């Protein structure tokens, strides 16, 4: 079975903009899958639909075998999303933010792995700091941590390394590979950096003007460029 199955997915915003024009895509379980494409291609729209943050206009989405319309709760529980925006509630420390997030997902107190997650993303020394005192890099680390609190099967990262310094980029890449290899987590990431997709991904779909322009193994797709 696939981690994600998408059939005939369309999104037209209230403005009339057709952001997705009939996407068919499957993401195999256990893979690191890249969504590549220029700004405005529809990548964030696609991810926000997977995350349940944007309502699709038409089509079918299954997440870890759960139909998003028929089993919204199970679909949502199967996926964790690290968003692009660095919005965080300014009144919560990293520890507090992770606890709140775990509460939102209904993770029982005994099953919370807050310290483990703080350590994984390298925020153990900032566990009690206020979010508004965190640098952009630390916010990204916290957003990654928040995506992991419910131990999802699938981790989605929206432009995780856009405008990020080399140290944080390498931390993100290392963590993503570890989550994939050690926990078998399926990873989906969007990027407009070719070299990032080439370095990280097993398979790639190129999105352009709201359509899948190409989809193949990274070697086949980028090997000849
Ligand atoms: P909707 O998703 O129903 O269009 P939003 O509140 O998201 O409503 O957006 C309201 C309006 O703001 C949109 O109709 C659009 O004109 C504009 N807008 C918001 N985000 C974007 C964006 N990323 N690109 C272009 N226009 C946007
Ligand atoms: P990408 O992530 O590939 O840059 P997006 O999914 O953000 O692409 O955007 C796809 C298209 O939809 C763009 O033309 C964008 O301006 C438009 N768009 C995104 N969000 C909204 C919105 N809320 N309302 C109207 N248009 C939007």
Image (cartoon, grey):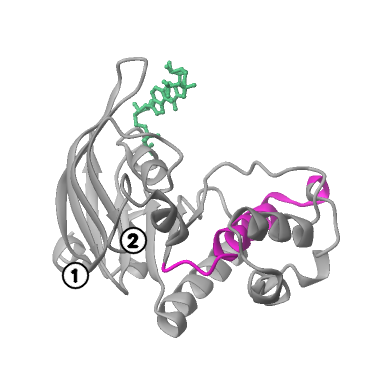
The spot of residue 116 in percent (x, y) is: 68, 77
Residue closest to the eye, 102 or 189: 102
- Quadrant that contains the C terminus: bottom left
Q: Residue 100 lies in what quarter of the image?
A: bottom right
Q: Which residues are magenta?
A: 132-153
Front residue (pair 4, 120): 4
* Side (left or right) of 43 relative to 121: left
Mark 1 or mark 2: name the one nearer the start of the chain: 2
Residue closest to the far bottom: 182
Q: Main secondary structure of the magenta part?
A: helix
Alpha-carbon neighbours of circle 1 within 10 Å: few (<14), some, or many (≥20)? few
| Residue 142 visible in image | no
Q: What x and y, as percent, mark residue 142?
A: 66, 58
In this view, the residue farthest toward the front is 70
Residue appearing at x 54%, y 69% in the figure = 170
Q: What's the residue at 60%, 60% (across, down)?
A: 106
**Residue at point 81% right, 65% down?**
127
| Displayed quadrant of residue 46 | top left
Q: Is mark 2 within 8 Å of ligand 2?
A: no
Q: What residue sits right under mark 2 in the picture?
A: 197
* Label 1 beta carbon within 8 A of ligand 2: no
Q: Is residue 216 visible?
A: yes
Residue on which the image places disc 1: 219
Q: Quadrant of the N terminus?
A: bottom left
């Amino acid at each position: 079975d696939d981690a994600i199955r998408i059939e005939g997915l369309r999104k037209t915003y209230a403005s009339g903009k057709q952001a997705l024009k009939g996407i068919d895509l499957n993401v195999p379980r256990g893979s690191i899958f890249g969504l590549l494409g220029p700004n405005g291609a529809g990548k964030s729209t696609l991810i926000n639909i997977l995350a349940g943050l944007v309502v699709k206009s038409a089509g079918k989405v299954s997440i870890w075998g759960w139909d998003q319309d028929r089993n919204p709760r199970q679909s949502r529980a199967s996926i964790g999303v690290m968003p692009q925006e660095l919005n965080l509630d300014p009144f919560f420390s990293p520890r507090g933010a992770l606890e709140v997030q775990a509460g939102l997902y209904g993770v029982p107190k005994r099953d919370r792995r807050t310290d483990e997650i703080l350590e994984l993303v390298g925020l153990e020394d900032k566990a009690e700091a206020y979010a508004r005192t965190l640098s952009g890099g630390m916010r990204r680390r916290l957003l990654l941590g928040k995506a992991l609190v419910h131990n999802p099967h699938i981790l989605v990262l929206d432009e995780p390394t856009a405008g990020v310094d080399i140290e944080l980029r390498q931390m993100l890449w290392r963590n993503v590979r570890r989550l994939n290899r050690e926990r078998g987590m399926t990873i989906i990431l969007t990027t407009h950096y070719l070299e990032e997709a080439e370095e990280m991904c097993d398979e790639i779909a190129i999105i352009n003007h709201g359509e899948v322009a190409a989809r193949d193994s990274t070697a086949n797709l980028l090997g000849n460029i």
